[in-house]
Amino acid sequence: MGALFTQVTALAARSILRTARQPAVMISALLFPMMFFAINANGLDAASRIPGFPADSYLDFAFAFPLVQASLFGAITAGSDLARDIESGFFDRLSLTPMRPVSLLLGMLFGVIALGLLQGVVFLSVGILFGVDVRSGLPGMIVLVGLMIFVALGFGALGATLALRTGSVEAVESAFPLFFVAIFMSSINLPRDLIEADWFRFVATINPISYLVEGIRSLVITGWDTQALVLGFGCAFGIVALALAAAGTSLRTRMAR
Amino acid sequence: MGRSEGIEAEGLIRRFRGGVTAVDGVDLRVEPGEVYGFLGPNGAGKSTTVLMLTTLLPPSGGTARVAGFDIVKEGPQVRAMIGAALQEAALDNFLTGRDHLKLQAALHGLPRAERRKRGAELLERVGLSEAADRRVRGYSGGMRRRLDLALALVHRPRILFLDEPTTGLDPQSRSALWAEVSRLARDDGVTVFLTTQYLEEADVLADRVGIIDRGKIVAEDTPEALKSEIGRPSVEATPANRDERDAVAKVLSRFGQEIPSQPETVSVRLGHGAGGLAAVVRALDAENLKVSNLRLDEPTLDDVFLEKTGRSLEGAGDDEPDAEEAQA
């Protein structure tokens, strides 16, 4: 257990250090989600006047968007870093140590969590500064950041799986648009019951990202919505469990080569 | 071989997708404390052999034991005993030299108090103390190679694999690395398995040399024994008049078999009882042929390679498939 802790700590420190030393990555991770948020909140504000719209302000409604998108950024960064390690041979260097496969995965994911935590705190601060009203108060904000971290963890494990299966930075980065499409095909921009096109509403309903978004959103616009939170955390746990299992299998396969 | 600090392989084979057989039945035995030079052109199978012996690539056939442990069934035990600096110095450009050593020491389970001390000691040994806190993206090729070597030594391995450690290095960096490898073998008793395509490197560093070509070992012995096996020196003549090259070649052919050389020169391996340089001079003089340069060369490892494969080591691998590419 001591060795596992040492290995995870060392690899997490490396992950955090290399992210912190890439200002461009940090700026992208913090700036782009806020930029999209500002554009969406401003451009789609009229949507809040649609009868049955669940929030008084589109700003509050759209606040889930930067949080989910930020998790995606973190996952792509982590996946690309791992693929780069494989391409450069650094992964082989790590494989030649007594490192346990689970340490590599956990170390990398702790880096994702650290970035997710930073993003969550920054976005919440900026959001509140610009008028986002979090109905669930301070405890809700803590739960919100917690859920965001779970989402980041799930996406991060998916990014790791892609990296381990392909060993290619290009392959991981080319998956980014697919993740992005998956976010847009959810209830990110409108509540599911207000989506007019049947096929879109169907896709949004079977898309687990809708439930992650609705869980986060409920804390902002409703307060404490047990059903939304159970579904949100349930989906997040499910994604994390499946993605970790896939990443673990891919890791064992790659290390056995 | 029981538990030892040596390497033993029998019939080691590695086939890649597309039917490329990079390693084709390699047998080798490296004694504890020995520096073994694995010499061959690009694509000969050197790196693939190292990847298998370091457990990074499973063999398609054959067996091998490193430090007495089976490379397939006892991978973790093998990895605990070895250090490796592979063909590319795989470093993280965003970390410093010291960061790398701290990470490596932690993953090898060195106690916290020892990590810093061991890191500083190795940085000092490879001459990187001053650059220790700089990110490695600013390191030269030689510095990266030296850090790579330091990382391979963090856990005091008994067997060290070095895959073309001096490729692309300037002469000064090359000499420094040679000195350190020699010191490791001499003072610390580390077994070194070194691949190289440089004849001089194998000649200077290795106690024994295995010559590999197209996945097979074609010769193996001490450099001196391999060269004495060839036994005969060669004579190289540069005609003063280029038009007389064929005439000079005809005269020299009386003394032995012509061997590949530069277009403007003629080289022959002197046959047994063919006489020495003086006899060649007299024969050229008798034919009234003038030469601008006449040289007697003792046998080299390239001559050994030529003798065993019919080709010169330099450029021998240019037309061969690259095993690492085949792996991808």
Image (cartoon, rainbow, N blue to C red):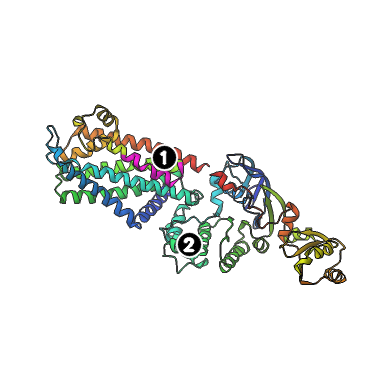
Which span is picked out in magenta? A166-180
Query: Tag 1: Cα neighbours inside 10 Å, few (<14), some, or many (≥20)?
Result: many
Quarter of the figure with residue A22 = bottom left
Query: Tag 2: Cα neighbours inside 10 Å, few (<14), some, or many (≥20)?
Result: many
Principal SS element in the magenta part?
Answer: helix
Q: Chain of mark 2?
A: B
- In this orientation, which residue lies closer to the viewer: A208 or A42? A42
From the image, tell me which residue sits under label 2: B118
Which residue sits at x=23%, y=51%? A122
Q: Chain of mark 1?
A: A
From the image, tell me which residue sits under label 1: A247
Position of residue A50 measured from the top left corner of the image (x, y, whole percent)? 13, 34
- In this orientation, which residue lies closer to the viewer: A175 or B193? A175
Position of residue A176 measured from the top left corner of the image (x, y, whole percent)? 35, 43
Q: Secondary structure at mark 2?
A: helix
The type of residue carrying mark 2 is Arg
